Amino acid sequence: MQSISIRDLKLSFGALTVLDTLNLDIRDGEFLVLLGPSGCGKSTLLNCIAGLLDITEGQIFIKNRNVTWDEPSRRGIGMVFQSYALYPQMTVRGNLSFGLKNQRMPRAEIDARVARAAEILQIEALLDRKPGALSGGQRQRVAIGRALVRDVDVFLFDEPLSNLDAKLRSELRVELKRLHNRLGNTMVYVTHDQIEALTLADRIAVMRGGVIQQLDAPQVIYNKPANLFVAGFIGSPAMNFLNGAVVQGGRGFRFGDQLVPLAGYDGGRLLDCADAVLGLRPEHLRISTTPVAEGINAIVDLDEPMGADSLVWLRSAGAQISVRVPAETRHAPGDEVWLVPDITKASVFDARSGQRM
Amino acid sequence: MQSISIRDLKLSFGALTVLDTLNLDIRDGEFLVLLGPSGCGKSTLLNCIAGLLDITEGQIFIKNRNVTWDEPSRRGIGMVFQSYALYPQMTVRGNLSFGLKNQRMPRAEIDARVARAAEILQIEALLDRKPGALSGGQRQRVAIGRALVRDVDVFLFDEPLSNLDAKLRSELRVELKRLHNRLGNTMVYVTHDQIEALTLADRIAVMRGGVIQQLDAPQVIYNKPANLFVAGFIGSPAMNFLNGAVVQGGRGFRFGDQLVPLAGYDGGRLLDCADAVLGLRPEHLRISTTPVAEGINAIVDLDEPMGADSLVWLRSAGAQISVRVPAETRHAPGDEVWLVPDITKASVFDARSGQRM
Amino acid sequence: ADLEIAHWWTSGGEAAAVSEVARMFDERGEHRWVDGAIAGGSGTARPIIISRILGGDPMAATQLNHGRQAEELIEAGLMLDLTELAEAEGWRDIVTPVTLLDACTVDGRVYCVPMNIHSWQWLWLSHQAFEDAGVEVPTNWEEFVAAAPALEEAGKVPLAVGQQSWQSNGTFNVMSIALGGLDLWRQVYEEKDADAAASAGMAEVFAGVDVARRLSAGSNVQDWNQATNMVITGAAGGQIMGDWAQGEFAIAGLVAGEDYSCLPGLGVNEVISTGGDAFYFPVNRDPAIREGQLALASHLIAPDTQVAFNLRKGSLPVRTDIDMGAANDCMKRGLEILTRGDTVPDLAMVISPDTQGQIEDLMVEFWNDFSMTPEDAQARFASIIASAD
Amino acid sequence: MAPARAEPRGRRPQRVLTRRNVLIYGTLGLISLYYLLPLYVMVVTSLKGMPEIRMGSVFAPPLEITFEPWVKAWSQACTGLNCDGLSRGFMNSVRILIPSLVLSIAIASVNGYALSMWRFRGSETFFAILIIGAFIPYQVMIYPIVILLRDLGLYGSVWGLVLVHTIFGMPILTLLFRNYFAQIPEELFKAARVDGAGFWTIFFKIMMPMSLPIFVVALILQVTGIWNDFLFGVIYTRPDSYPMTVQLNNIVNSVQGVKEYNVNMAATLLTGLVPLTIYFVSGRLFVRGIAAGAVKG
Amino acid sequence: MAASARPHRLMRNLSAKIASLPMIFTALVIFIGCTAWTVVHSFTSSRLLPRTDFVGLAQYERLWSSNRWIVSIENLAIFGFFMMVFSLAIGFVLAALLDQKIRFESAFRTILLYPFALSFIVTGLVWQWILNPEFGVQSMVRSLGWESFSFDPLYNPDIVIYGILIAGLWQGTGLIMCIMLAGLRSIDEDIWKASRVDGIPTWKTYVMIIIPMMRPVFITALVLIATGIVKVYDLVVAQTSGGPGIASEVPAKYVYDHMFRSQNLGQGFAASTMMLLSVAVVLIPWAYLEFGGKKRG
Ligand SMILES: Nc1ncnc2c1ncn2[C@@H]1O[C@H](COP(=O)(O)OP(=O)(O)OP(=O)(O)O)[C@@H](O)[C@H]1O
Ligand SMILES: Nc1ncnc2c1ncn2[C@@H]1O[C@H](COP(=O)(O)OP(=O)(O)OP(=O)(O)O)[C@@H](O)[C@H]1O
Ligand SMILES: [Mg+2]
Ligand SMILES: [Mg+2]
């Protein structure tokens, strides 16, 4: 069953068309993440679903009901914003019950719902405080609570964690995931942080310039990016791109004056291609300090210890390559090493179309 | 040789003492990161070094010269701010040369310096643009350039990357590190992002409430945190803390009804302690799906794939434990597993004093 | 009914006169006088009055200088027709000079009640000032000019003139009748003869004004009664001002002929311009008010009102069939001239306010800007007259 | 420069009489004198008797303090027949002020709110017209508005005047409110819409409670403007509801012999008392509100 | 489904449109309507009452041949220019001084702001008096022994407009100062730090960096000053009534006098149309630059 269906959505601001003929089906109970660089139209799409923007063309269905022209409050959605958007002059309780009061719900019912949401989010103790007296994480929870009390089918999140510091972000991420497991609602979540996308999503829709580039499960997005954009956008540090050519009837990749065998490549049958890109993630390369016949010769440039592991930055044939290594490993700048790629996890792209081969 | 020496620094805002009797020596050419939670006094310390705040007591030496009462511009420092603080109505060139013009430096010399800085930072093409027409990363570079042209001994950075998005942040981090390698200046860098601290620093000073908690190389900070605060602050996800007791004359750790042997612990000689904390980083735990005699029994709670690897969240004896596992591994919520710690990398703390034992 | 009456009579003498009329009106019973005074002169009051009338919420009666100001309001049918009352009371027979009533008459219908006669043509002289300067009190303009240096020597301003434009203009107008003669004046203003305005006769007038403006150089006051006050206190030798100045002298307790003297027509051409104030009654739908309006109209022109009012205000009554025995020296001289019939119409009756405004602008400029020669001024004056309506 | 002590340590030595301080406080002090001078003159003069005024300089302090002028200004000064001073107009002013304040601020705040949050086709155009309208001299509109009010049947009533104040206060107030509301995060507005709040609910429940500073600014500007207004007050009402400024004008402009400067000054001070008090009381909020409403152009 | 029907354009945002009716009414009926009415009647020979007997450009010909109008325009230009320059300069300097973390800031601020609470009538009256040579500043200085000292701006046609300027500045700079202060406070403190590290003297930082950054603030201030300048009427009337001679006439007074004193509405309307035209000539290009420029980023 579809929870949200978007049909041929088009949205323009005056002459600027931000979304054009966009189609998207979101499954019931699914956690869908909209991921993309700034300005690609993620928030715009979310606002269209919420009814906060008047769409130019197309239709939107929520729970199989055409809500294209419904008021936001009548679409069965709840929304959580980046800045929390709590009503500063109301207490937490006031914030939670505001939407319900607008529906003229009986007092008792309101109290019950607020109590339940507060319990789920563990903010019972904060109910009589004002938002100004809450920490970032607490505010975030109240914002979620505001959607929760309304018992909606769909939760919409617009970068709900990006105002928080890294530590809190990772904590709340886990909480959110738990909440989703517990409630089972459909959730649509906008972010430009790929870690959030990878950890939270059932499926990720990667967007760029208003167009969905790939819509798939996180592992697929990570391991088999549909095109160069997705490949480069996902992963930190980014996937290494080696510009070269597919040769030998698809069995080898020429990179500078080196030849990388492509045996074991997981994808379509490779054809020779004069202008191709070999994509290798930092963790799919191994560093050998002794020469390896089929390895890529490279010079160590820099060493970045990151606690749990380290990154080594290298140069080879004009390209910059990063490799993830265990925390203890150290490489001195200037060392000559050989990189052994795990081709089963690699991606080869046609440089012209950008598509994965 | 010391590049910066701070002696008995005290700084109060009226009745509020932010820094008290702080001593710090920064070596020549060192990249020192000041790391700590918001409000701990990092910026304050940096401003004291820069001369932007009048200190209450103590002395500050830069290059062995007592600069306690010198004007900021005469201390041989350059500073880069979180908000970039570029002069919006001047071109990039204007921004770079403004300080020099003010020193009545000859035109030719100014041009040469600007050209050099622009070359180092690769912003030659931007010299005639205004800051408004630059991207975040470019602005950041111009801000660094402004310090660069002044040929200073010491660079001070106040969270220079925290306004940028994650991707750009990781790119600029590498650039900054390269810049430091190339220039060899002393750099003092304030951040509350531990990844930045770990990757950039030669040494990290972890601060809390105006007091330096630990000052050491990143690996030491990461692997042998001096106290619970440092241990919990560094690392993402945070170090797992198991509350229990050191028993058996320091050879075992009682956690709930389980006993974890402490053989191989890298630290002082352990004594029995009724109130202790065992700290284990997520990557120093291994998950076994079959019972292990000395493993910690736990229930899987949640699974967070992060692309390069995955996090598994578990519960055991009331504690929440996270474990870093390879990307392919999957664990279903509710599974019973056994966690095998790598005690050589563990830390044991006295719960009362918080100090590492 | 309560009758709201708008007027701008707020100076000492004026207010005293009005309150007397109001008291008498109230005593008649039936109706009540609700005072709607607005200070600041006609310039401030007029937009208010006209707005009220246009806005359909008019006052019961309003002061307006009769003459051409109200023409358009009458034509627009906004003013109460008083013809029946006028005929019943025989105003045409009692109002002297009858031109005053003519000014209230449009197409044979009467629309206003003339309240008093104001004449501008007075030179008020301070005995004190001349005494201090050690010269005789002059009896005409020439003597006055001759005595001026002595006054200046004694630290006095020979001629007090307020800064407001209507005052310099009034002074000019008085001098043009006195120095230029009546015929020339009629040619210029009534016939709007630009050649006459450019003639040698007028040149003489301008030369006279040139002298006068220099005599007035030290009077740094705004309002006319501040200027009058300079005469009262002896700080100035004289002032050319209308008969309303007399009210101020009276309030200050000065006696005509003893403490001050007055020279009608500057002692040269003894005529009186018969301007004056009149009351108009905007059309009102409320019959009670209308009744009150008629009662008020009748009250204003009644003999005892005329006596009481004009004695206090220092102006002349619009009827001669009353006993003005209590009038002072100056007023009696005015009455004399009036009875002789040596009158000219008031400026407001012969030229439009617009033209008047233009002349005022010219005069105030000329009066204050000594770099403007009398010839320049006259040339511009002539061109204003040429386009006057 | 560093003192004899070889090693600078601790707080930089600071003298009270640095050149900077002398410059700053000196300049501010002098300018404050210039600003206070007229107030001083007003107060001093209003406490002198007429003879003393005629003799001395305006700046001389009163030799003999008298409150006579104040009493006279408040309750005795005459306009025409009415000799009850300013007291007559005070209540009228209040009666005009309150509804004008309420209506003009209410309408302007709703305008600003609609302009910043509920933009519709043409809304910006209307706003632009409004702003240009702020430059039109009032005098031009006196007659057309008279005719308009007559047709609306409001002419001569206090409500007509209230309407006029609302109209002429609208451009600047709307600008202030618009700028203020524009810097309230849009997300707050969106959240409220998702919560099912409509135009008015959002305005009353969410926006108004957040907008105290700008309401204070609007209040101060309007109190000053309306209280000090003379022209509209006298043109659009009738004598029984003339505001205090009309009496002030009458007192100041009716010269009875000599100008009674002391009474004029007392009357002036009495008339200015209401706006002055408001300034003194809420000056701090005013600056805050200005910061919130005016700076973001 | 009924819900899916696209609502008519007019019905979207209905509450907002209804709530904006007063603004729309004001913009269209009052500002546009009255302006159009005025412009139309400026081509007629209306006298006391508006009439529609058209006389072409006659009113304009007369307007531009009128010496008084020319003087008025000149005065407005002088007054406007200096008022803008001095208001901005003084307002900014005062704000900069107050921004130096000084003591008694709120006292100084109140002193500088209070004149704004007073009406122009009152302002004019007080300054008329202080500048009166017989008992104001001049007489005081003379009584101190400076016998030849002469300062009588209100009675000297060559400088009378500056006498008015003094009063205008006294009344208006406080508000400008407030706006500037708010603007200064909104500037990122890091900019100050950066310039100190660069070794740039304070004054130079203000001139080269801060002032250019405060462009929007200056524009807001400028709009406020400009609306006041165009309408300056009360101040002139209260201080000099346009005198001595016509030396301090201003356009708004020309309009007023012709409409109400000379009963020549047509002429008054022509003059006010000219005023509007000049405002439009200044305002429209500015609005175009300001709002057209924003889109370009
Ligand atoms: N009200 C608007 N008027 C005109 N253009 C707009 C408007 N809102 C958004 N846009 C444009 O639409 C595009 C998409 O904006 P949107 O806010 O959806 O991006 P986003 O993906 O959410 O980016 P971010 O990650 O920065 O939030 C951008 O180019 C933006 O400039
Ligand atoms: N000008 C000031 N007046 C009073 N207190 C101040 C001032 N500046 C900073 N503080 C206080 O000093 C403490 C340290 O502030 P500081 O800015 O150094 O923190 P920080 O470590 O840089 O934090 P962040 O990471 O948020 O920038 C805080 O408690 C802050 O409230
Ligand atoms: Mg967005
Ligand atoms: Mg900081």
Image (cartoon, coloured by chain):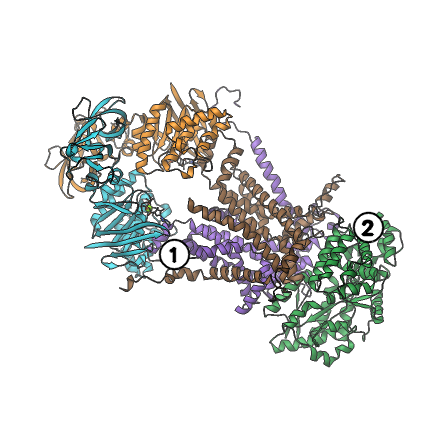
Chain colours: A cyan, B orange, C green, D purple, E brown
Q: What residue type is disc 1 on?
A: Ile
Q: Give the farthest residue toward the bottom.
A: C88
Q: Nearer the viewer, residue C58 or A5?
A: A5
Q: Is mark 1 within 8 Å of ligand 1?
A: no
Rendering coords of residue D248 (x, y %): 64, 58
Q: Compared with residue C183, is residue D219 higher up or lower down, i.e. above or below?
A: above
Rendering coords of residue D277 (x, y %): 56, 52
Residue for point 54% across, 58% down: D168
Location of residue C83 by image quarter: bottom right
Q: What residue type is disc 2 on?
A: Lys
Q: Which of C293 and B171 is in front in this view?
A: B171
Q: Can I make out residue D11 in this image?
A: no
Chain label for disc 1: D
Chain label for disc 2: C
Rendering coords of residue A258 (x, y %): 20, 26
Q: How crowded is mark 1: few (under 14 residues within 10 Å), some or many (20 or more)?
A: many
Q: Which of A215 and A81 is in front in this view?
A: A215
Left or right, C41 with reference to C125: left
Identify the residue under disc 1: D202
Q: What element carries label 2?
A: loop
Left or right, B186 with reference to B298: right
Q: Compared with residue C42, is residue E130 higher up or lower down, i.e. above or below?
A: above
Q: What element carries label 1?
A: helix
Q: Compared with residue D23, is residue E282 higher up or lower down, i.e. above or below?
A: below
Question: From mark 2 to mark 1, how far is it between C-alphas?
Answer: 73 Å
Rendering coords of residue A298 (x, y %): 23, 25
Identify the residue under disc 2: C156
